[in-house]
Every structure is written in structure tokens, then in C-alpha cells.
Amino acid sequence: MSRPLVSILTPSLDQARWLSDNLHSVAVQTYPDIEHIVMDGGSTDGSIELLQAAGDNVVWRSEPDAGQADALNKAFALSSGEIIGWINSDDAYFDERVVEDVVAYFDRHPEVDVAYGHAAQVDHNGRIIWMIWVPPFSGRILRIVNFIGQPVAFIRRRALSDPMLDATYHFAMDYELWLRLQRDGRVFRRMNRITAVDRHQPDRKSETISHVLHADISRLAETHGRGYPRGKRVLSWGFYAWRRAMGGMLIPKIPDRLAFTDTQTPRSEIVRRQLFSWNKAWPRDYRSPEAF
């Protein structure tokens, strides 16, 4: 197997509470050739001290930016890896072999431009809420719903332009990237393994600026032909139910050693939420602010 450099890009602003897990999940990867680039937007919450303590493991800057996409574009311009990963500061890689397995996958499949995996939704303490199963790639499904969560994906540099993201999007910049790459004929493939975590916490964008998401999605319908077909309610529920059911098959694959936390979530607890909370609302124990 060849050993290309892998660049992990992380935008951050006042996320010290989660940033340490993010940094640790990259630092413990078994693959040796990684550069982790963090673009901090001028944090005042202790994030700078965490970045300073990371030493040579992390390349970082702290300066004002024009938002998350702008920070990612700055990080991409600093990077030199042949393979690009993108994890926000409150996300992390799932286990210690993620990057090694991704590089091996790309090595076996030279035609693939974007490789992505499954995810685990976790809370602020790293406890697993449920598993997010993702289907094999379908352009038709992608134009209906963004099923590729940004932290689970890795992209060959050859597929990207500079700037990497359209900075006029403030929420759906990852979705715009996937649609643009698909339009350009880039090859997507799913790796059937859990690659990252998506953290459910009260400061995430889906909780604070959901109106921006709706505005971005409306633009994507115009620029990339994204949109629901007829019967969207039935299709949406069916897709959700399919993912929840298939996610149950990922639970036995959860390793004992995780890269982002020492917290151990009983599998029975995950199964209970995964299979017996059949609605789109958060399970009862994660609905109230006290859950955070």
C-alpha cells in the first residue's frame, strides 16, 4: 500500500469543550502520515491553549474569518495532502484505524474520488445516542437528501478546486460540495465501516440557525436541481426508517476502544434507542437542555 499524506481540516470557534476530543481522535490514528490543520476564528474559551498544548501534531492559526466555509478554504490552502478529511471541532473520528483503512480503500480503488462511511451520533460526553447508517451511493437519493455527513467522508485532492467550498453557503456547504462533485462526474463509494461521530450539542448549527439551512437548501434547488419529488413525506419517513433499521446492524461492530472518548455506552442502551424510538424527534433523554 502506498502512503500518501492525509490532510485533516478542522474549522473551530469557541469549541474548547469538544476540541480536545477532536484533536485526540486524529492524534491517535495508526496511520503515520497525517497533517491536522485547525483554523480557529479567534476563540476566547481556552481553545488556543488546547492548540498550543497539541505541539507539532497540529498546524493551526487563530484569526478572524468570514464563517465556517471561509475557515475550511483557508485550511485547504495550507494543506498538501493527496487525501482530504474534514471534521468540525465538535466531531471526531470513531476509532484509531479510520485513516489507515481509508488510505487502504483508496489504494484498492484508484477510480474512487470520495469515500465515505457510517457515523455514530453522540452526546456531549461521548455517549452514543444511535448509529447513523448511510446507503451505497445514489445520485438520485443525494439530490433529494444529503445522506453523506461531512465528517464521514474523505476526498482525493484531484477532485477539488481552490477554494474548496462555496463560501456563500453558511450551512449546506458540504451538501453543495457533494452535488458539485457529482455533477462533475466524480466517483463516490461507501466504505462499509463506521468512520466518524456527529455530536448532538446545543450550540450546533441545526439547533441555532436552522433558518439558514432552509435558505441554503432553496438555493441548491435552483443551482443543482436538488429537491423532493412528489410524495416527499412518505419518502422521507421511509428513508429515515430504513436508516434506523439498518443502523441496528452497526451496533455489534462498535469496538471497545474508541478514538474520541473513554465513555462506554451499553449496547442495550443503543439498541433501545435505535430500534424503539421510531420518530424524528430526539429520544426522551435527549430532548431537554438538561440532557447536555
Image (cartoon, grey):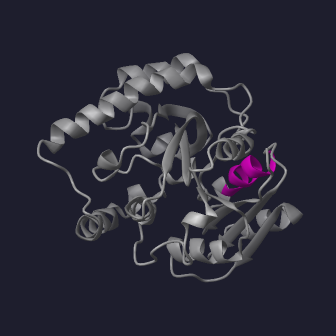
Foreground of the two, 38 or 19: 38
Residue at 37 percent of width and 51 percent of height? 146
Asked whether, in this view, residue 113 is left or right of residue 275, the answer is right
The residue most toward the top is 268
Q: Determine whether 160 is above or below 199 in the image.
A: below
Asked whether, in this view, residue 94 is left or right of residue 200, the answer is right
Residue 133: percent from the left, percent from the top?
A: 46, 34
Count of labels in the image:
0
The residue most toward the front is 111
Using the rendered image of the protein, determine whether residue 200 is visible from the camera's viewpoint. no
Q: Quadrant of residue 85?
A: bottom right
Using the rendered image of the protein, determine whether residue 221 is visible from the camera's viewpoint. yes
Quarter of the figure that contains the N terminus = top right
Q: Decide whether the magenta segment is chiefly helix, strand or loop.
A: helix
Foreground of the two, 219 or 109: 109
Residue at 55 percent of width and 55 percent of height? 113
Asked whether, in this view, residue 102 is left or right of residue 202, the answer is right
Q: Determine whether 136 is above or below 218 in the image.
A: above
Q: Determine whether 203 is above or below 95 in the image.
A: below
Residue at 71 percent of width and 71 percent of height? 79
Verify whether residue 99 appears in magenta: no
Q: Determine whether 68 is above or below 20 in the image.
A: below
The region drawn magenta spans 19-28
Residue 46: percent from the left, percent from the top?
A: 72, 66
Foreground of the two, 144 or 278: 144
Residue 23: percent from the left, percent from the top?
A: 74, 55
The residue most toward the left is 230
